[in-house]
Image (cartoon, rainbow, N blue to C red):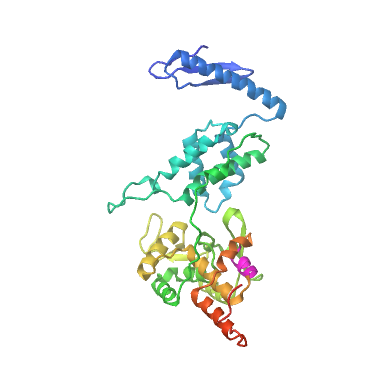
Amino acid sequence: MPVHKPKGLPFYYAEFQLHGHRVHKSTKAKSKKEAELIERQWKAQLEEDIKQARVTGTAPVTLDVAAGHFWNDKGQYHVNSDNTWTDIQRLISYLGKDKRLDQLADADVAALVTRRRNETRHGRKETKGGKTVPTLSNATVNRSCTILLKAIFNHSAMRGNSFPKPPQWKTHMLKEPKERVRELDTHEAVALDSSVRDDYALWFEFARLTGLRRQETLIKWSAVNIFAKRITAIGKQSREVHTPITPAVAAILKKCEGHHPEYVFTFVCKRPREGQVKGERYPITPEGAKTQWRRLRKRSGVENFRFHDIRHDVGTKLLRQTGNLKIVQRALNHSDIKTTVKYAHVHDHEVAEALALLSNPTKKPTTDEKVPA
């Protein structure tokens, strides 16, 4: 059938069959001549694709198909799988589900990054108070855009698809600020501990003792092995995260017994939602943990401190105590010690103490004066 324009629609459609493949879709062209040109290009491309499939054994893969494979094989197992799903759907919406990966060019990725970095969180332009909402951070753009698209691309290649000219991914990565290492001072630690809600206190103490990521702290009883004295949770990139059960952690677990049959950490319901009963205990959810952390930080008055900084605090103090990077690496479950090296920093007073030793070389450093390697 020649190109045609359905009644009531602005664009011409192409409909044809070639070597058993049926094509019926809009050309997005408003003139018949332009539509016919597009149809000829599609037929030529289909001929080329069929030739390629005969040689390589694989047909060109679209973003929709590749993203589906990635989700089924990896994405659904991510710790924050809901975010992964949302980010995948956004990529498909921006690039189009029929976008072929072998035709994905640097210009496509660059346009995608530009569009994403001009967006704000949740698409809001103003807060309830009328303040302007800032655009997304470079780190968020990288994770939800370039890094994810590259992962889908590489996963498709691993499944046997060939891409002669892949995008230059490094050129599309936005510069991120160097991750800081924030440590709690004694006053701040006391302020946080005294401000936590009673029913969230055990969970918060567990986080302070282990340095686990927020998602990793929401453990189930099935992850607790009392006999092996170890907790096994699922962390970033679906890796197992092992945490030793110290006497302090064991005491926390003991206090949590009987609160819930499946989850270790729970809260007491104060404002019942659908299906809840006031005064009953329910598992702490990821969103609930975020909300309580925001409220806790506000009540305590501790500023410029994120939940993830608890992890930094544990790593820094542990390194100061032991002087051993390998121990810190194991404790924080870093797969690469390069990630742990960022904790090997020294403070001004530690530099002063080390320099003071030069003026008195016969003096032996005390435990408190020992400077981490």
Depth check, front residue: 44 or 365: 365
Q: Quadrant of residue 51?
A: top right
Q: Quadrant of residue 329?
A: bottom right
Depth check, front residue: 290 or 62: 62
Give residue 216's position: percent from left, percent from top. 54, 61
Q: What residue is at 49 percent from the left and 14 percent from the top?
A: 3
238 versus 43 height, above or below: below
Q: What residue is at 60 percent from the left and 22 percent from the top?
A: 45
Q: Is residue 328 magenta?
A: yes
Depth check, front residue: 345 or 102: 345
Q: Is residue 234 left or right of residue 30?
A: right
Range of residues picked out in magenta? 325-333
Q: Residue furthest left?
A: 130
Give residue 151's position: percent from left, percent from top. 59, 44
Q: Residue furthest top?
A: 2
333 versus 29 height, above or below: below
Give residue 301's position: percent from left, percent from top. 36, 69
Q: Main secondary structure of the magenta part?
A: helix
Q: Is residue 184 magenta?
A: no
Q: Residue furthest front?
A: 359
Q: Is residue 203 left or right of residue 59?
A: left
Q: What residue is at 45 percent from the left and 71 percent from the top?
A: 201
Tell me if I can see residue 222 in this picture.
Answer: no
